[in-house]
Amino acid sequence: MPFRFHRRLIVLPIFVLFLQAQTVTVTGVVLDSATVQPLPSVNLVLDGTTEGTVTDDDGRFQLETDQPLPFTLRVTHVGYETRELRIGTPAQTRSLRILLNPRVIRTPEITIVGSRSRAQQDVSSSTEMVSLQRVEQRGIRDAGEVLEEMESVSVTTTERGRQSLSIRGSNPDEVAVFLDGVKINHVATGVANLNFVDVAGLESVEVLKGGGSVMFGGGNFGGVVLLHSRSPETDRLAVKGSRGGTLSRDQDLSLAGSLQWRGMGIGGQLTGKRRLYDGRTLFDTQYANYSGQYSTLRQDWIYRHIDLDNRIEFPSGGVLTGDRFRVDRLEWNYRRSPKNGWSLEGGTTRWEWNDHFFSTLSRRLRETSRSAVINRAWGFRSLEGNVQWESNRQVYAGDQLFTNSQTGAMIRDTTRLQQQEAALATTIRYRGRTPADGIDEILLEGGYRLGRVAYQEEQHLLRLSGEGAGNQDTIQLQDQPQLATFRLGVAATTHWGEHSWSFFFNAGENRRLPNLADRLLWGIGRHSLEEEYSRLVHTVPVSPYQALILQEEIQQVKNILLSMDRGFQPEHVSLAEVSLRWSREWKGSHPVNRLEAGMSVFRNFYTNKVAYRTVADDLIVPYNTATAQLPGWELYQQLRAFRNRFSLKMSYTHLSPSDPAVFPGKAAQQARIVGDVHWSWGRLNWSTIWTGPEHYLVGGVRLQQLNSRSNTHLTVTLKKRLGPVAVAYHYTVRNLFSQQQAVLGREQYDPQDPFNYYDRHRTLHTLTVSWNHES
């Protein structure tokens, strides 16, 4: 039966391709005429009709139509001159190479064109971007599901639905996540919860891998994730709804719209989600994303407001409505020339959590973050660069009351944490063109960031017995360290005949402070660790084997205490990466259109790396290790064939951590296969994600291994355009071959085997109706 099922999956797309052979298919790539770089999100419309498409992240497009030849293809993009192409013969429909000229206004002193993004201003590194169009075609609804299909990215989900990510084996607090330029990592833990992100409102997701980022703050040892929301650049209205076939209370409903007139645009998206992340706790989430934009040839003004509210219904009947998240952001861009301009960004994030219905626990938590960035881009002949000043202020306030239901004893924890950082960053690059035959461009670049951090922490622990007597402990920490990041690199692109190559190498250093929560735990955990050491020393072993194990534990705790005598030190990493990619294109009737392959090798060497040990009462104590290494390598391959109707993408990541106890929960191997077949009225997507064995640290002493696992997802899409209205239906099967069914009642819940929403077999039905008018 499984064999017949797979055979049908293969035969179906081939049969559909045969049926659609009579349609006219226009394929090609759109490039910037000045830089010969691909242009994503370019609009291509058949003149006089509503049929059209947009280019993908590589500037490529495919447009299928029943219109008879000849017809005119109209190509438009913000910041570029409109171009019209007359297509009269079948030979003119294949492998088009369309060059767009930047829209230029010339005065005696000024030339005005588009500007580079902050990601492009940074030193070259391994990057990957996925557009919202691809996300919608895959029936994906959550940000974690988008990121888990990207190279070297792994996503961890808790029973309560909180999603955090790791890049190349990094810890979650070592990855900075920006939503429209505002960092959304939690102030106390440094971890970004991806569940705060409404993927339906995103335009694209971009991942910058490696720990040497200069333009996005310091301490991002793992990398940077950039989430870009939709911009109101067209007149658009869309309604999207989904419902679980396996789990009926698994539902999404979103309404989005935007209007644009003479450079001014407004837009918004409202989304409601319902999830059972642990199989029994109901999460009702409401997202709101509003934006306004005003653009001229020289300036852009952009404002965005994002609002999230969680309503959580527990199996006990209690309801929590105090989980709220807010983002406000204002951006101004000024372009004086292709390489010269200014940008100003400012924003705030606010998060709060209130619950008072448990008889043993009452919590009131607040986090606030305010940031500002001023960036100046400059260029002179073959030199260009950026100077950036940034400021970030973070505040955390927590009031928690724990009550022992049996004895009546209470512990009140009042914590205040705040951190202020100011930094100056700069990058410079030399761009040489055609220095030798076959070399298109060579780039020499460097970046440096210097920041000063002032942080202050204060915690009061009030312990009250059942009779009212008690005592109070106060812990205070403060410091003003200076942190620096630098990175040097070289990049080149070249070609020989039909073959194209790209290469880059970079190396640098980075430093980061332990997150606020770790610094607080370090302060209160040392006393508990000393008590643990005393207990171990006075333990009498009952056998030679137990004596050997006991001696190892005593030595481990002693080494940790010795390291804590130096204080809680900032972490330091030296890093290096080399990457090589190759591609080739075939024209004419060749079945293969494009083939890409690449390999990256990287090495991270740490000093003062933070590790953890659990002591009595399950208290987690962070401490600095001496040295640790995390080298690895990646492989990448992508195939496009049959007039770009078929694509297959594969990637593999291998990590070699020096000590699993320092890098717990990191799979040494990961592999991904993502396939896509599409035709004029439908699409078939599938993906398989395989994760190798992982080691988890238990109590800071024992390593336990989690077996390898794989998830396979399948989406079938049917679509139809009726004038300006487009209708699409998606049938999605998540975890196709999983034996763990998602239908669980409360009476079936097993605490020893918690329900994992993202690993269970489930089906989804999604319907999207949209109206789009290109202005």
Image (tube, rainbow, N blue to C red):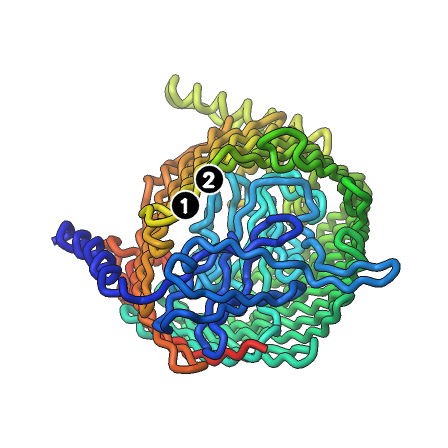
Q: Helix, strand or loop at disc 2?
A: strand
Q: Nearer the viewer, residue 292 or 47?
A: 47
- State the image quarter where residue 122 is shown: top right
Q: Residues within 10 Å of mark 1 (few under 14, many from 20)?
A: some
105 relative to 689, above or below: below
Q: Are marks 1 and 2 in contact (CB under 8 Å)?
A: yes
Residue 634 rendering spot, x and y as whole percentages = 46, 35
Q: Say whether disc 1 or disc 2 marks the residue closer to the N-terminus.
A: 2
Q: Helix, strand or loop at disc 1?
A: strand
53 relative to 2, above or below: below
Residue 530's disc is none
Q: Gap between marks 1 and 2, in whole Å?
A: 7 Å
Q: Nearer the viewer, residue 482 or 383?
A: 383
Residue type beneath disc 1: Arg
Query: What residue is at 70 percent from the left and 47 percent from the top?
Result: 121
Residue 539 rendering spot, x and y as whole percentages = 49, 27
Query: What residue is at 13 percent from the left and 53 percent from the top?
Result: 4
Residue highlighted by disc 1: 594
Say left or right for 73 vs 605: left
If the image is split into quadrants, where does the C terminus sit? bottom right
Q: Nearer the viewer, residue 658 or 597?
A: 597
Query: What residue is at 65 percent from the left and 63 percent from the top?
Result: 80
Residue highlighted by disc 2: 583
Q: Nearer the viewer, residue 469 or 749?
A: 749
Residue 198 rendering spot, x and y as whole percentages = 52, 67
Asked if one can make out residue 553 in the rendered structure from this viewpoint, the answer is yes
